[in-house]
Image (spheres, rainbow, N blue to C red):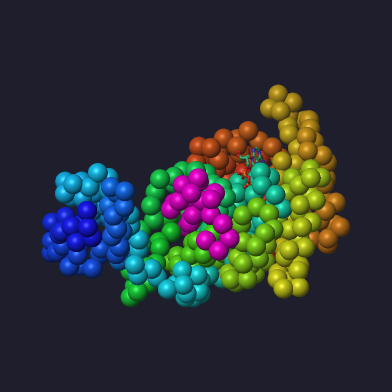
Amino acid sequence: MTEKEIYLALSGVTHPAKNDKSLEALGMIDRVSFEDGKARVRLAFDKHRDPLADYLIGACRAALVAAGAADAEVTAIVRNEAPAKKHAGLDLGLEELSGVRHIIGVASGKGGVGKSTVAVNLAIALAREGYCTGLADADVYGPSVPKMTGTEGMIPDAVQEGDREIILPIEKYGVKWMSIGYFASPEQALIWRGPMACNALKQMILQVRWGELDVLLIDMPPGTGDIHISLVHDIPMEGAVIVTTPQSVALADVEKGINMFRNDSVRKPIYGLVENMSWFTPAELPGNRYYIFGKEGGNAMASKYGIPLLGQIPIFQSICEGGDSGEPVALQDGRPDSAAFRSIALSVADIF
Ligand code: ADP
């Protein structure tokens, strides 16, 4: 098969969304070649995720085989990829944060200490105290806000303003929520690396119509890597609350977290430490406290670094179940589990 024959074979393939013009006329045939009985064609699309891309690739392959190619490989590229600047997210301004009075990060030295649980319950507790509250779930490696708030599967609306697309947060339980989890599956998010994760996170915060808020909490990814430094630099965060368990392994990582915020290039105040999973009280022995992860580790760390201990949250089955069912305990009244979060919310509100 010659190149000419390949073009001829493809001449009948037209783009239904572009006045049925042929791909050749639209300049979409980017490259053709023929080798060892195999026709290779590369199509060039103007935009990512052209809804007709799969259809057109299939139609080209069928046309080539019908024209006698023993095998046909049709691939696609995006021709006019947005300029690097746009991809780097550098054109995202801070306009959407102009109505937000306080931005506070919720961080942890390591994963699994209950950072997201604390962030979600804290957001609800603040909202129930009358503060206009938002929460941006920037935990790119394990966005858990959709599940914890029962908003899994929801897709936020967006509005187009000029050449900008603004995402509208999901509103539930009196809080405005935004999460990378509304856009990417956990598997997808997991493979994001460096700049890609950073850009997605910045969009998740800067491209969202937060409106007027007393406080926006940022559920930060666990750890202290480049993503954190970039987040802290690019988002006008006032300071952070750090969540830990009393366990020494968690505390060792908290020291790294504290040092990250106190680092010369960052210099953000740490408003306090929240000790989670402080003790366990079985329902049948309400007077007993079992210090499963050690006792008063958070207190010791707080005094070592001169940071207030904002509160201790015991291990409650209801906290875990509330996270799994999408109905966080902070929605309840007059119970020790929700009271723990309410008291921390009041301490956080004292900051602003
Ligand atoms: P992180 O955000 O630090 O990775 P998560 O908030 O996802 O941690 O919590 C990890 C697990 O621990 C979740 O299953 C959550 O429900 C559970 N959990 C967190 N805090 C408590 C608590 N105080 N009592 C019981 N379970 C908790």
Visible residue check, residue 54: no
Asked if residue 181 is among those painted magenta in the image, a careful observer would answer yes
Q: Quadrant of residue 8?
A: bottom left
In the image, what residue occupies the spot 78% across and 38% down? 293
Spot occupied by residue 288 in the image (x, y as percentages of width and height): 78, 30
In the image, what residue occupies the spot 28% across and 55% down? 34
Q: Nearer the viewer, residue 36 or 231?
A: 36
In the image, what residue occupies the spot 40% across and 63% down? 167
Q: Quadrant of residue 194?
A: bottom right
Please, is residue 312 above or below residue 349 in the view?
Answer: above
Within the displayed image, which quadrant is ligand 1 positioned in? top right
Spot occupied by residue 161 in the image (x, y as percentages of width and height): 34, 73
Spot occupied by residue 217 in the image (x, y as percentages of width and height): 58, 60
Asked if residue 12 is among those painted magenta in the image, a careful observer would answer no
Q: Nearer the viewer, residue 305 or 223?
A: 223
Visible residue check, residue 94: yes
Q: Nearer the viewer, residue 70 or 105?
A: 70
In the image, what residue occupies the spot 75% across and 41% down? 278
Magenta range is 176-196
Quarter holding the C terminus?
A: bottom right
Please, is residue 98 above or below residue 187 in the view?
Answer: below
Residue most toward the top? 284
Q: Nearer the viewer, residue 84 or 260?
A: 84
